[in-house]
Amino acid sequence: MQNDLYEIDFLPVETKKSGDAITLRYRMNGEEFIHVVDGGYQETGPSVVSHISEYYGNPGYIDHVVLTHPDGDHAGGLRTVLEEFSVGTLWMLRPWEYADVLLDRFSKVSSVENLVGYLREAYPNIVALEEIALEKGIEIRAPFQGAQIGAFTVLAPSPERYFDLIANSDRTPQSKADAAQTLLGAFGSSAKAMVEKIVSLYKAAWGEEVFSTEDTSAENEMSVIQHATMCGDTVLLTGDGGRGALEEAADFAPNAGITLPGVKRFQIPHHGSRRNVSTEILDRWLGERLSAPLPQGQELFSTVVSSAKEDEDHPRNSVVRAMIHRGASVAQTEGSKFYWYRNVQLREGWSHSISRPYPEEQEAD
């Protein structure tokens, strides 16, 4: 319909580490929605509220608020959003709601009640949002695979995979590992993080791709993957989803009537980390690598990465290169005002066409 529209805003989260805060307004078949996906850190919350008030007609009501996963750079700012607006539905996964199903995975936990306590202690960001929602009477629903959130279909996670991730997370009681193994795992994770930071760059030929052999965290893999088609454009919002999440989402896509490859608007997951994607999964979603670069302005689709100016680790060159290999333009937030839109006027001071140049160097494995 001619009156269909959308605007998807990637708000800058400017701290020393990157975060995600996305707001959406869209109209389909005469019905309009406001939809928030993550809110950055707690200090980001007021800017999210101000943006919605200024650009979405000063609404008092938000239809959907989605927490993709429980990390503070996604959850913190949603506290302010819930406090300042009337909200139709808060979509987030609360692991303690499934304690009875999870109990047999935790041999060291003696009861459902104890497991509920452990899980609530492990995920304080979710607890804080739950408390606000319950106090305000906001409905909380689980965004499991197949759920419909406004125009968006949830492609991942499935309940079964989510339960596996909770059981295997280093935040939750380990069912098999003893204290020494847990300590060793924590040390290993820290060492891997240090290696990731000091990785060297080398000049690489067009089309060459090298990603980390390490996987992202269990919490990132819990990310809610959302897909919609609006005004003829396919949109994929990925949160911090890793290779497992993107693979599960791709496997489910045919059930939602989605033909792959083919995404017009693609959110690069986890601020452009090289632990979240691979050549194979990007081929499934975005198509295979092109034989040569496309001229500027003739890109096939657009991508955006939420990255802070002070975050020197994101995005990784290898990830930016992989997007451009498949014909994408690549935008970074980094303090800029960036959004995707159809059938609305371009706002003064905002951009929809910033594109990062192709990096000639990429990170060594």
Image (cartoon, grey):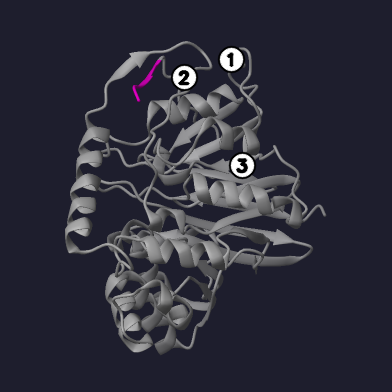
**Among the two numbered marks 3 and 2 on one chain, the one whose residue lies closer to the N terminus:** 3
Do callouts 3 and 2 mark residues in contact (Cβ within 8 Å)?
no
Check disc 3 and report its element: helix, strand or loop: strand
Indicate whether residue 184 is drawn in magenta: no
Rendering coords of residue 342 (x, y %): 67, 46
Q: Position of residue 170 (x, y in %)?
A: 30, 60
**Element on which disc 1 rests:** loop
Quarter of the figure that contains the C terminus: top left
Q: Quadrant of residue 193?
A: top left
Name the kind of residue labelled 1 in the image.
Pro
Give whichever of 106, 45 is nearer the camera: 106
What separation in Å lies between label 3 and label 2 (alpha carbons)? 19 Å
Horizontal relation, residue 221 to residue 7: left or right: left
Residue in the foreground of this view, choosing between 298 and 189: 189
Please name the residue shown 64% across and 26% down the image. 288
Question: At numbered mark 2, what does the secondary structure look like: helix, strand or loop?
Answer: loop
Residue 358 has which mark? 2
Q: Residue at x 48, y 88 (%)?
A: 137
Residue 6 is labelled as none
Taking the image as drawn, is residue 180 in sight?
A: yes
Tell me if residue 67 can be seen: no
| Residue that badge 1 annotates | 293
According to the picture, the residue beneath numbered tag 3 turns out to be: 265
Mark 3 residue type? Arg
Image coordinates for residue 72, horizontal then vertical, percent: 31, 61
Q: CA distance from mark 3 to mark 1?
A: 19 Å
Position of 184 compared to 77: left or right? left
Which portion, as a residue range, is magenta? 361-365
**Magenta span: helix, strand or loop, mainly?**
strand
